[in-house]
Image: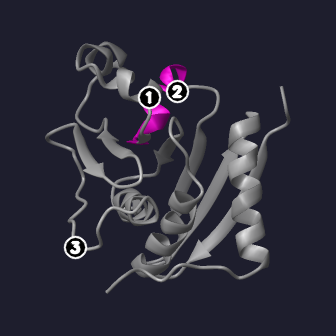
């Protein structure tokens, strides 16, 4: 097993958080899983919107938190499964809802509140931890240890060094 690698970014706005998510989405392939972690209001859904944009979900598609539906599916280069475990009490609720199946499909799965059930996450997931540092500022740490996660993190690091960013469509 490889050593864990991490990248840290500081975001000063929802727009920057979306851009970072979009850059990540551009580097994802079928079967990738993103574990979104952060307290309520930290920006997990903004980051997920960016992932969707990077996957080619049309910019006019409203990506919202699936807190009440548990999962929303969006069409892009790959199906985008946006899962929210906030209302689930325990692992058996997650499993009985069948949400674990989407972690092993040919789409991209992004799971909000993924830290509640880390045992269900495949080894190849990329962990995104979002910390609130101010009214609109966030510290966003991307990490992983599996070769696929490291490949994604290397691509993100290269984009940062080359100052590559994809502006959200307006």
Q: Are marks 2 and 3 in contact (CB under 8 Å)?
A: no
Pick whichever of labels 3 and 1 is earlier in the sequence.
Answer: 3
Q: Nearer the viewer, mark 3 or mark 1?
A: 3
Callout 1: few (<14), some (14-19), or many (20+) C-alpha neighbours within 10 Å? Answer: many
Judge by depth and name the residue closer to the eye, 136 or 55: 55
Pick whichever of labels 1 and 2 is earlier in the sequence.
Answer: 1
Q: Are marks 1 and 2 in contact (CB under 8 Å)?
A: yes
Q: Is residue 132 visible?
A: no
Q: Secondary structure at mark 2?
A: loop
Q: Is residue 73 visible?
A: yes
Judge by depth and name the residue closer to the eye, 79 or 40: 79
Q: Which residue is mark 1?
A: 103
Q: Which residue is mark 3?
A: 60
**Count of numbered tags:** 3
Judge by depth and name the residue closer to the eye, 95 or 79: 79
Judge by depth and name the residue closer to the eye, 98 or 169: 169
The region drawn magenta spans 110-120
Q: Are marks 3 and 1 in contact (CB under 8 Å)?
A: no
Q: Secondary structure at mark 1?
A: helix
Residue 5 image point, x, y percent: 79, 47
Residue at 27%, 24% (x, y): give it.
89
Callout 3: few (<14), some (14-19), or many (20+) C-alpha neighbours within 10 Å? Answer: few
Residue 37 image point, x, y percent: 48, 47
Callout 2: few (<14), some (14-19), or many (20+) C-alpha neighbours within 10 Å? Answer: some
Q: Which residue is mark 2?
A: 121
Q: Secondary structure at mark 3?
A: loop
**Is residue 3 a member of the stretch shown in magenta?**
no
Quarter containing the N terminus: top right
């Amino acid at each position: 097993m490889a050593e864990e690698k991490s990248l840290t970014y500081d975001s000063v706005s929802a727009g920057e958080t979306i851009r970072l998510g979009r850059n990540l989405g551009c580097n994802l392939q079928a079967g990738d899983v993103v574990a979104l972690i952060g307290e309520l209001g930290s920006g997990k859904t903004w980051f997920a919107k960016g992932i969707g944009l990077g996957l080619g979900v049309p910019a006019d598609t409203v990506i919202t938190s699936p807190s009440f539906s548990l999962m929303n599916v969006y069409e892009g280069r790959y199906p985008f499964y946006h899962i929210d475990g906030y209302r689930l009490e325990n692992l058996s609720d997650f499993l009985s809802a069948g949400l674990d199946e989407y972690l092993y499909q040919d789409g991209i799965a992004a799971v909000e509140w993924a830290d509640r059930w880390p045992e269900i996450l495949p080894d190849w997931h990329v962990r995104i931890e979002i910390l609130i540092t101010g009214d609109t500022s966030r510290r966003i740490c991307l990490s992983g240890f599996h070769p696929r996660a490291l490949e994604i993190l290397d691509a993100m690091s290269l984009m940062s060094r080359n100052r590559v960013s994809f502006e959200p469509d307006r």
